[in-house]
Image: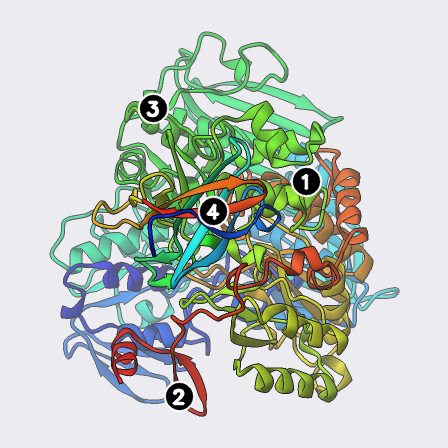
Amino acid sequence: MSNEWVTVCQEEDLVSGSGICVLFGEQQIAIFHESKKGKLYAISNFDPIGEANVLSRGIIGSIGDKTVVASPLYKQHFCLETGACLEDENMCVSTYAVTLQDGEVMLKKH
Amino acid sequence: MVGHQFIENMLELENSNEFEIMTFSEETRLAYDRVHLSAYFTGSTAADLALTTRDYYRDKGVKFVLGDKVVDIDKSGKTVVTESGQVFPYDKLVMATGSYPFVPPIPGNDKEHCHVYRTIDDLGLIKVSGDDSKVGVVVGGGLLGLEAANALQGIGLKTHVVEFSPRLMAVQLDDGGAKSLRNKIENIGVTVHTGKNTTEIVEGEECRYRMIFADGSHLETDMIVFSAGIRPQDELAKKCEIGLGHRGGIAIGDTCKTSEKNIYAIGECAVWRGQVFGLVAPGYQMAKVVASQISGGDKTFTGADMSTKLKLLGVDVASIGDSIARTDGAKVYSYNDDFAGVYKSLVVSEDGKTLLGAVLVGDAEDYGNLLQLALNDIELPENPQSMILPGIAGGGVSIGVDALPDTAQICSCYDVSKGAISEAVQNGATTMGALKTETKASTGCGGCAVLVKQVMDAELIKLGVEVNNNLCEHFAYSRQELADIVRIKKIHTFSELLETHGQGLGCDVCKPTVGSILATFWNDYVLEDAHVGLQDTNDTFLGNMQKDGTYSVVPRIAGGEITPEKLIVLGEVAKEFGLYTKITGGQRVDLFGARVDELPLIWKKLIDAGFETGHAYGKSVRTVKSCVGNSWCRYGVDDSVGFAIDIEERYKGLRSPHKLKFAVSGCTRECAEAQSKDVGIIATENGWNLYVCGNGGMRPRHADLFAADLDRETLIKYVDRLLMFYCRTADRLQRTSVWLENLEGGLDYLKQVVIDDSLKIANELEAEMQTVIATYQCEWKTTIENPQKVKRFKSFVNSSTEDSNLVYVEERGQHRPATKDERIALLNI
C-alpha cells in the first residue's frame, strides 16, 4: 500500500465517543472518534497482549495528558497518538494518519 | 464450641502436622453455635449453626467419634473408653465437656412438656411441644432464659418469664437497667414475673400445667423451659478422680492443667480460682492457652473480662466490668429515659477517675469505647456523666483510639488487639472487609465494629495514606457520591456529568461506572448515542466477549423453566451458526463463538421464537435459579419455580454496581443453593425466608438470614428497597457481600434501613425500583429493530469479510478456539 490517503469509510459510519473497525488493504484498523475534543485516531485493531482483533471495541478516554483506548480483553491502555502501551513499555501498536474530508474518512500510513 | 476452637488453634500452629487430633462427642453432631441457638426458630437450620463440617475435619486430618461419649479415662495407661466400649490412646487429653442446665428440684419438673434449653435436640423437643401449646413459661430470667423466651415468642406462644431473684439478669444488670429491660420486653408481649419461687408443678385448669409459687400465687402454662443457670459437666472427671472445685467443676490452674499431668480442662466445665466462666470468650482464651502449652509455648490463663453486649428479645443490652458496683467506695452515675426505653449507668472509682463498670440498655452503641476505658484504666474526663447524657455538646464517649495501648483487646470474641489491627492495616488490609478477613476482628458478635474502624482510620492517617475513595482521576467523588449527584441533580448523560463535576476525557473506569449509574436511575437504552461510548464491549455488543474476540449469547430462561419447543430453537440456532453450547450455573444455556456480524441474525431468530436478552453481559440482574418446588417435588412446601419466574421478570434489566444473582428454594433442603446468592429465598411452612448478600466466586460468603416467614408482597418490598439501597451506596464493582461487610452497622443497620425505614427513604427506593420495572426493554429487540444500531454489528464497516484470525479445533463433538500452538500448526499447513 502506497503512502497516499485512502478513503476507508464515510463520516456517518463513525460512532461518536467510540470506535469502529475498517479494512485498510489487508490491515484491520480501529478508528476512534473522541467526541469531547472532536478528534479522530487510527491504530491497529490487533491487541498484542490478548492476541485478538479487538481494540476498536475498547473504551476510549484519557490517562493524564494521553488519549488512550483500553483493551476490552485485559484492560491495558494504548496511547492513540503513539501506539505505546502504558502498562508494558515493550508493547505497542501501529498508528495511522486519519483525516475527514468532504464526509470521507481517509487513512494513510505514517 | 470451645473444643472446636481448641482444634482450630491446634491446626493453626506452625507444627500442626506433628499432632494427631481426635475429638469425641456425646451428640451426633460436630460442634455448633450454642450462642445463637434461638436462630433455629427463625429459620436457621442445624447446618447454619454448625461451626465446622465432617469434610473439613477429614480434610484437616482431625478424627472424630460422634454419638459415643467417653465414659472412662485410664490415667496411667493414657487411654479413654467410650460408651460403646472402644478404647483410644492419648498423649494429652483436653476436657471440654461444657455444662448442663440446672433444673431446680421442683416436684413435677419432669413432666412431658418440661424442657431444658441447651442443645439442638432440646430445641427439637421444644418445637414439638410448642406446636401443641398456646402458653409457654421460661424459668430463669438470665441471659439464656431471655434467649429461650425469644425462642418461645418466635414460635408464637404467649410467653412468660419466671425469675427467682427480684430482677432480670441479676448478675449483669443493676436495678435501673433491669427495670428498663423489663419494660422493653413487656412491651413486646413477654410477661415477666420476678421474685417468684416455684414450689410445685401440677395439672392445670385452663392450660396443661399450673405452677405454684411460694407466695401462694400461681401461673398456668402449656409448657415449661428451664433455663435457670448452668452447672459444669464434671461427671467424667469426678468418676476418674480428677480434682474438682469446692462447688463442682474441674479445677484448673493458670496453664489450664487439671490435677492430672496430661489432662487439661477448658470452657464451662472448668473452674479457675473458684470461678466458672459461662461465656464463650473466656473459653476461647483457655483453648488458646492449652494449644500453646501442648505445643511447647508458655501462654497462661489470667482470668477473663465478663463484659458482654448482646441483643435479647430485640433489646440491646450491655454489661461491663463491675456493673453492679460491688467494689468498695464505687460511685454510680445513671441516666434513665422511660420514653425511649434507654438506661445507662457508669460505675466509677471512689476518686471518680477510672471506670469500673457500666450498664447499657436500649442503646449499647458506646459499649466498645466504654469497655476500653474500663479495661485500660484510662483516666476519665472531668464530667464522666456527660458520656451517658444524650444530646449534650461534648457528650457521648470518644476516647480517641490513640489513647489505647497496642495491647488493648479490641475484639474480645477473637482476641484481636489494637496492635494486630494496626499491623494488618500496615500490611495492606485497608478496608473493613479486608480487615475482617485478615484478623477476624468484628466477625463474632460485631460489637467492636465501630472501634475497629476507628483504629483502622487512625492507622491509615498515621501511614500518611490519604483516605481517598475517588472513582478515578476524572472525578473527585466516590461512586456513591456520583450516584447521589446523578439522582438528585437529575443528570442524564456522561458528558453533562463530566462537564459539571469532572475533568479530562473520562476513562474505562468512570465511563462504565457512570453508564451503570445512569442506567440504574433513568434506564435509557444503553446503546443510545449519548451512552454507547460508556459501555464496556460486553454491553456495547450485548454479549460476553471471549478470548478470541467473539461473543457468547445467553437468552433469558426465567427461573430455569423452558419449554421443549424453545429448547429445540436454541439447538437449531446453535447448529445453524456453529456455536459451542454449554449449560450455565444459572440454569440457562450459553452459546459461544458468535462473531459480531452474526449477533443480530442470531438474536432475530431467538426473539422471533419468544426469547429475550438475558443480560449476561451486564453488571445487572442475571438469573433467579430455582428448584422444581412443590408442583413436582415430594418435599416441596411452596411453588419455588413460579416465585422465581415472578422475581426474575420483576428485576430483569436492573443495572447495578455488580452482577446480581438470585435463587428460590421450595423447601429447607435448599436445592437451589439460595444461601450462596445475593438474594436467596427459601420456602417455609409459614411463608418465605429471605437471605441476603451471599455469593460464590473468588471469596464465597454465606448469605445472612434477613427476615423470616414473609409473605410474597412483603418480601418483594424488602428486596426492592434492599437492591436500590445497594445501587445507591455500593462502590464500583462491589458485590453485595463486600458491600454489607463494609456497611457501618452491618446487617442490623441494613435491617433498620430496609425493614424499619430508619432513613425514611423506603418510599423513594420503591419508586425508583418501580421506574426500572416500568421502563424495561429487551435491548436486543430494540437493537434489531433499529437499522442504524445494527450497522455497528459488523467486523469491518467497509467490508463484509470476516476476521481471518479466528481459528477453531474440534473437541468432544463441538469446537473451541485453537491454542497458540495449535494455531501455529494449523496456519502453517
The mark found on residue B811 in the picture is 2
Q: Residue at x 32, y 68 (%)?
A: B238
Asked if both marks, 4 and 3, belong to the same chain, the answer given is no
Foreground of the two, B533 or B511? B533
Split into 4 quadrants, where in the image is the C terminus of chain B? bottom left
Foreground of the two, B151 or B687? B687
The mark found on residue A106 in the picture is 4
Closer to the chain start, of discs 2 and 3, is: 3
Q: Foreground mark, 4 or 3?
A: 4
Q: Foreground mark, 3 or 1?
A: 3
Other-residue count near label 4 (Cα within 10 Å), few / some / many at <14 / 14–19 / ≥20: some
Residue receiving disc 1: B753
Instruction: Tally the numbered discs.
Output: 4
Residue B65 percent across, percent down from the top left: 35, 80
Mark 1 residue element: helix
Residue receiving disc 3: B461
Is there a contact, CB below 8 Å, between mark 4 and mark 3? no
Chain under numbered label 2: B
Residue extending furthest left? B296
Is there a contact, CB below 8 Å, between mark 3 and mark 1? no
Chain under numbered label 3: B
Say whether residue B186 is left or right of residue B816: right
Say whether residue B258 is left or right of residue B125: left
Foreground of the two, B169 or B504? B504
Chain under numbered label 1: B
Residue B610 in sight? no
CA gap, disc 1 and disc 2: 52 Å
